[in-house]
Image: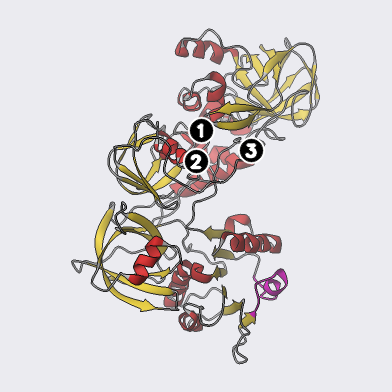
């Protein structure tokens, strides 16, 4: 008979860690006597990061005495007191390889349902002073699991644990955890996981995407996500950078020019998906070469790529391109990449942009027009005025090739010509956008300033579009994902403090920082953080893949081999160091 050995609680607190403040509820301690367990947690307990822990689905965390005994031997530790793994219930029995998702148990007066394995999280490593603990829990198939409270009631140490109902499909906690985090997934187990109503919605979504990824595809596609930040598989057309020739330069407006690039040996160029971008490496002045990314603004031909660049007044690279780049010049180019791409679908398409943000959606419009796509298409663009409206005639002509096109252009600083009814004065508002009658089942693609995309994304969501059908692109650093870390002042990315390194050059392309590697840093993630480059991570041990980043150029070594290696052309920055000069899409 399984038994509850200890009830452990703790309220969230701030813990200083690696120069940061982490708000966490991982510090749990045993309590004596009876405790009420309610819908959200145990009396006296709380969670610091409700995005990954807590809530109805993850109200109570369970860990087993047998796993404590295992880790005592494995880690050589004699200080593992109940609650140190962050669990609310320490139990004798209920092993992860026997307990199944959907099982129900009675403990004291309360009844519970198993909903998912523990979330891989760096904070368990913080608590144990064992940084690799999140990876070890998965690799050794001892994650522990969460419970949902079916019936509220009092519990206490010593209560017997009684199985009241077996979950459907009988998929164990250990198998469920391995299905998400480890390679060589069993399609039959994926099917079983999707047939378990008790499984938490987040894990269900991840398994749906993994199941979709296992289906045969006609062209490069998107694998399932193990987390919402997982990036898609993308086979680069060539490794690193190669020289391409500037074929011609065409001014589009006083501040925007299109650059046509061709191969130097007349070989056909690899195809690109509409919406992808090129990374350029240019030697500007005496500084190390700078890397910048620019969207392809048309569907590539066999021999030519086109990018379009806006001259930013203080932009070092854009100034060089506009003032000094000339036909015949050679430029180092990385192959097309990017996840903001036009998906194959039968749904209506909405292309929304502002200013130079038109470039990736213009490539999508080229593709739609080239195939005379029968889907309804909405083209919504905002420009300052007629003089600064890049691609005005081009986009208008492309829309004329589509049987069901709707064109709406906004001029923020100029009244529209009287004979062009598709041009509106002002900025898009909820009222003017509602008048466009965008269908709620559409796929929307947005590119422009962050505030612009946030505002229009909010409108589309309120209008009824599902969040996963609203796609956005930005070339500045992506928003950071640092779960539990207290907000701090946002600093402009910079060179790392201390003496400069002597190793390979590391370039954070989105942040515009190039710096030599120093062995003082434990990983590429550690270097990025020292430069205040916005980063995205969760486990910090190569398990969750939240830190997956496109590797534009270079080679790396994994200091801790990840449990599942990322796709070609990507790298897990949390556990890798450079072998050569490296360019990262960060």
User: What is the x, y in percent for residue 279?
Assistant: 36, 58
Image-quadrant location for residue 349: bottom right
Q: Nearer the viewer, mark 3 or mark 1?
A: 1
Q: Is residue 286 left or right of residue 488?
A: left
Q: Can see residue 219? A: no
Q: Nearer the viewer, residue 84 or 390?
A: 390
- Mark 2: secondary structure: loop
In the rendered image, the vertical position of residue 338 relative to residue 312, given as above or below: above
Reading the image, the residue beneath label 2 is: 546
In the rendered image, the vertical position of residue 417 relative to residue 22, given as above or below: below
What residue appears at the point 41 percent right and 32 percent down from the top-left corner? Answer: 563
Cα distance between the residues tagged 3 and 2:
19 Å
Q: Can see residue 258? A: yes
What residue appears at the point 40 percent right and 52 percent down from the top-left corner? Answer: 509
Reading the image, the residue beneath label 1 is: 539
Discs 1, 2 touching: Cβ within 8 Å: yes
Q: Which residues are magenta?
A: 425-438
User: What is the x, y in percent for residue 117?
Assistant: 58, 30
Cα distance between the residues tagged 1 and 2:
8 Å
Q: Nearer the viewer, residue 15 or 206?
A: 15
- Mark 3: secondary structure: loop
Q: Is residue 13 left or right of residue 453?
A: right
- Mark 1: secondary structure: loop
User: What is the x, y in percent for residue 281?
Assistant: 32, 57
Q: Nearer the viewer, residue 179 or 341?
A: 341
Cα distance between the residues tagged 3 and 1:
19 Å
| Mark linked to residue 200 | 3
Q: Earlier in the sequence, mark 1 or mark 2?
A: 1
Q: Earlier in the sequence, mark 3 or mark 2?
A: 3
Figure disc tally:
3
As for residue 428 lying within the magenta part, the answer is yes
């Amino acid at each position: 008979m399984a038994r509850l050995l200890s009830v452990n609680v703790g309220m969230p607190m701030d813990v200083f860690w690696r120069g940061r403040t982490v708000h966490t509820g991982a510090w749990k301690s045993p309590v004596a006597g009876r405790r009420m367990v309610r819908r959200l947690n145990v009396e006296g307990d709380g969670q610091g990061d409700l995005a990954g822990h807590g809530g109805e689905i993850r109200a109570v965390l369970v860990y087993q005495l047998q796993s404590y005994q295992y880790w005592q031997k494995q880690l050589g530790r004699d200080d593992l007191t109940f609650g140190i793994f962050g669990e609310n219930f320490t139990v004798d029995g209920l092993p992860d390889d026997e307990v199944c998702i959907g099982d129900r148990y009675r403990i004291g007066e309360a009844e519970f349902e198993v909903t998912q394995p523990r979330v891989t999280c760096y904070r368990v490593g913080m608590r144990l002073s064992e940084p690799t603990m999140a990876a070890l829990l998965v690799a050794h198939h001892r994650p522990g699991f969460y419970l949902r409270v079916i019936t509220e009631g009092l519990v206490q140490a010593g209560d017997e644990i009684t199985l009241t109902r077996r979950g459907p499909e009988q998929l164990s906690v250990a198998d469920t955890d391995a299905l998400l985090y480890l390679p060589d997934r069993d399609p039959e187990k994926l099917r079983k996981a999707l047939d378990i109503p008790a499984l938490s919605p987040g894990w269900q979504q991840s398994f749906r995407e993994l199941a979709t990824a296992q289906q045969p595809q006609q062209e490069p596609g998107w694998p399932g996500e193990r987390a919402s930040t997982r990036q898609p598989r993308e086979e680069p057309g060539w490794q690193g950078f190669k020289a391409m020739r500037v074929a011609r330069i065409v001014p589009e407006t006083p501040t925007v020019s299109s650059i046509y690039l061709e191969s130097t040996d007349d070989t056909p160029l690899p195809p690109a998906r509409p919406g992808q971008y090129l990374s350029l490496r240019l030697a500007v002045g005496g500084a190390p070469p700078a890397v910048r990314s620019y969207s392809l603004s048309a569907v590539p031909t066999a021999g030519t790529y086109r990018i379009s660049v806006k001259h930013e007044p203080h932009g070092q690279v854009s100034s060089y391109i506009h003032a000094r780049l000339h036909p015949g010049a050679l430029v180092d180019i990385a192959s097309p990449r990017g996840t903001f791409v036009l998906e194959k679908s039968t749904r209506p398409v909405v292309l929304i942009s502002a200013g130079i943000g038109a470039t990736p959606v213009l490539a999508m419009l080229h593709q739609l027009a080239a195939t005379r796509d029968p889907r309804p298409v909405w083209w919504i663009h905002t420009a300052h005025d007629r003089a600064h409206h890049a691609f005005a005639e081009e986009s208008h002509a492309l829309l004329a090739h589509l049987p069901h096109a709707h064109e709406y252009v906004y001029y923020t600083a100029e009244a529209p010509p009287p004979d062009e009814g598709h041009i509106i004065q002002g900025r898009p508002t909820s009222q003017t956008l509602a008048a466009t009658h965008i269908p709620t089942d559409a796929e929307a693609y947005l590119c422009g300033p962050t505030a612009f995309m946030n505002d229009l994304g909010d409108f589309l969501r309120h209008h009824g579009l599902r969040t996963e059908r609203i796609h956005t692109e930005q070339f500045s650093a992506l928003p950071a994902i640092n779960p539990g870390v207290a907000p701090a002042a946002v600093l402009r990315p910079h060179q790392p403090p201390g003496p400069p390194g002597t190793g390979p050059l590391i370039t954070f392309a989105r942040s515009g920082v190039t710096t030599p590697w120093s062995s003082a840093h434990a990983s590429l993630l550690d270097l990025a953080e020292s430069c205040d480059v916005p980063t995205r991570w969760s486990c910090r041990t190569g398990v969750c893949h939240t830190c997956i980043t496109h590797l534009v150029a270079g080679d790396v070594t994994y200091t801790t081999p990840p449990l599942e290696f990322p796709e070609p052309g990507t790298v897990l920055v949390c556990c890798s160091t450079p072998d050569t000069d490296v360019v990262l899409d960060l």
